[in-house]
Image: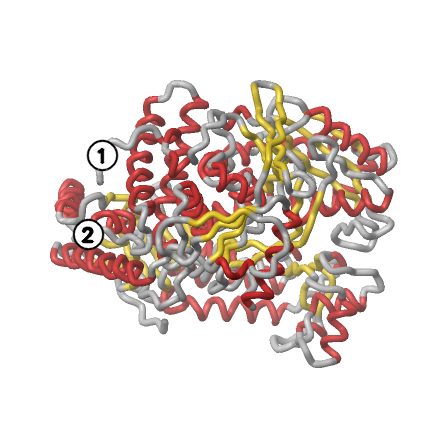
Amino acid sequence: MAGRQVGSWDENPVLFGADPTPGIVAAEIEPGGERVEIFRREGDRVETEVVAFEPFVLLADRDLLRGFREDVAVDEFAGDHALRWRVRLKSALSLENLKKHLQRKSARSPAALDAPYLYVSDLVQQYLMATGRTQFKKLKFEDLLRLQIDIETYCEAGFEFPNPQREGDRIISIALSTTGGWEHVIFGDKPEAEMLEELNECIRTQDPDVIEGHNLFKFDLAYVQARAKRYGVQLMWGRGGRPLESHPSRMQIGERAISYTRFDVHGRHIVDTFILVQHYDIATRDLESFGLKEVAVHFGVAAEDRVYLAPEDIGRAYKEDPDRLRRYNLDDVRETRKISDILLPGYFVQAQIFPLSFQNTMLRGNATKIDTLFLRAYLQARYSVPLPEPAKPIQGGYTDILFHGVARGVLHCDITSLYPSLMLVFECSPRRDQLGVFPRLLGDLREFRVQAKRREQEARDPADRRHAHALQATFKILINSFYGYLGFEMAHFNDFEQANRVTERGRETITGIMARLQEAGCRLIEVDTDGIYFVPPEKMPVAEQEALLRGIEAALPEGIRLELDGRYPAMLSYKIKNYALLNEKKELLVKGSGLRSRGIELFQRQWMEEMFLLLLHGRRDAVAQLTEDFRTRFKEHRVPVRLFMKTETLQEAPQNYQEKVRAKKRNIAAAYELALSAGRHYQAGDQISYYVTGSGRNVKVHQACKLASTWDPRRPDENTEYYLGKLGELYEKFEPFIRTPDGEPVAVEE
């Protein structure tokens, strides 16, 4: 398939949809679900049109319609897959009625994998799948008008964190900006209700396609909505004067399921850069924090004259230095825009591909999104769709650690596109994909990525270059998601046998590369499907190292590239997928959740990072002094509370917690005990920072904790023995690595 002529990507109907309508920036189902309102951008204007909409359900058995009294149209599809009947209805209400009928008739909910019908609850997705339309065709990312928003709040005295339900809390500043260069601050020198009305007017007059901010879902929008409700202010942010809407939702980011409040605005999209940076970190694992300021520094977009205010100083600035608070608030929206400029273009491209709203491209998993491409293609061909196969065990890829300890002169070779290339070379496609969508999409995407990389290199216009980069990066993500689709339990064309074929071929390929490296005298450190860390023979010249990799690559299956991805003066190999690297710029790179846990106190992370640097710089003898320095600072009470406090979010009301503890349905927890004893009205969603007092290592934390805000550096009362105990446990954890000479293996228990 490599090298075949596949045409231009934006003319590929399987990938980008068959309908070429340009400029769609949003599609919204009208009340009643009989029509769709389409918003199309034409230069500086947004035009609207209303078109007919027929919701549909796919059925495995036409007899399931017996007893349903409403008018429907039924189409029989070709092929012998289970879902071969399409039922078209006149409205969303009829669709809901049919769903309830099918649930009763089949005794299966729509979420059941063996349900004899397919019900797509997202009506916009239904419309886009049925028509082959997608958003943003023929538009550039820069064509979107994006508005950034950030709020600052006042927290009532005695509380550490703001809560919109408290009478004494309020919004004190709202900063707004757009990609068109407009900036504005709505300041709290006026009643809060007037601020909210002005915010409504700003959004109406600016008329953005996208509203974006950092931590919008969990803080800003929830806070604004709660305060608006207090004053009876309607947040009419949608096009056509529609209100801001919200509902509880959940999403999966990597291994974590996150509960949040989802917000929607008619005719616009809401982008939370807090979610985007978490998606980014799943791939890179190099963010120390998801906070706006830290992320801006990480991406190099923080201005040199940026105003910084500690959370506890915001209320003081509001009263004593309002101009500084205004500048601080504006800097927040400017950084949000710059972060979005970096992370959002890839999702813009995805919205051109998938039959999903722009907002949903950021909230759905990759395998789910690929499934929509299959469903769209089969609907367009009027071809039946299979039910998902029941899950079967899948053998994992080859992953191993062959050396624990500190190694020097480490190389990393990257095995690019291993699984996608194996799937194409060995024709590992779902056996039930009778239209051949899987290999066509995978082959086209690989070719399109080559074209996009070439365009990126040749582009003279910065906007064209950014778009080409977003294309190739998006194509890469999709290419690497096709293997996961084979083993996705909810995918309609999953195939667990083919997934096992791919991993089997992958293990053969990886072990073959390992054998060639070992034959050449290389010392292997860590191996997985992404690449291999190894140390070449001591006197092997650089040219021979590169020639060795080229020779190994020549024997690999077609399309698989073995590239030298990095040279590292030193590496600490701790456990599988947990290691620390010293790069050629003498920077520390820490990888793996075991070494980068956000659940430990900050002083422990600081000690680890400084200890890693000492080991990697060959100064293991200095670790003892480093540890003693930390001990001395604790003994002399010179460690600030921010380094040893813990911050936790109350997931339920303290009173509910108390009832569960009494009923022995949950354990006692320090944060809740503090909330109950503080004499203040803490609620679910409030955060509490605390530290441990008293003496002795074995104190019960819930009995010896105090609010971090009460810690007084003039009268420090933190439990020195408790925190020294934590430091000691951490030292013991790494002691085998500290006392073992470089290049010598460390005996550890996996």
Looking at the rendered structure, the secondary structure element under dot 2 is loop
Q: Nearer the viewer, residue 475 or 339?
A: 475
Residue 589 placement, left or right of 694: left
**Picture layout, residue 482 above or below residue 16:** below
- Circle 1 packing at 10 Å, graded few (<14), some (14-19), many (20+), is few
Looking at the rendered structure, the secondary structure element under dot 1 is loop
| Residue under the image location 47 percent in, 65 percent down | 114
Q: Nearer the viewer, residue 411 or 400?
A: 400
Q: Residue 592: x, y in percent?
A: 42, 57
Looking at the image, how many numbered discs can be counted on the residues?
2
Q: Label 1 near label 2: C-beta < 8 Å?
A: no
Question: Hey, which quadrant is residue 500 in on the image?
Answer: bottom left
Q: Is residue 422 visible?
A: yes
| Residue under the image location 83 percent in, 39 percent down | 233
Q: Nearer the viewer, residue 509 or 309?
A: 509
- Circle 2 packing at 10 Å, graded few (<14), some (14-19), many (20+), is many
Q: Which residue position holds label 1?
A: 4
| Residue under the image location 42 percent in, 35 percent down | 16
**Picture layout, residue 406 above or below residue 25:** below
Q: Quadrant of the C terminus?
A: bottom left
The three-letter amino acid code for the residue at tag 2 is Pro
Q: Which residue position holds label 2?
A: 536
Q: Quadrant of the N terminus?
A: top left
Q: Residue 145: x, y in percent?
A: 60, 26
Q: Nearer the viewer, residue 526 or 569?
A: 526
The three-letter amino acid code for the residue at tag 1 is Arg
N-term-proximal mark, 2 vs 1: 1
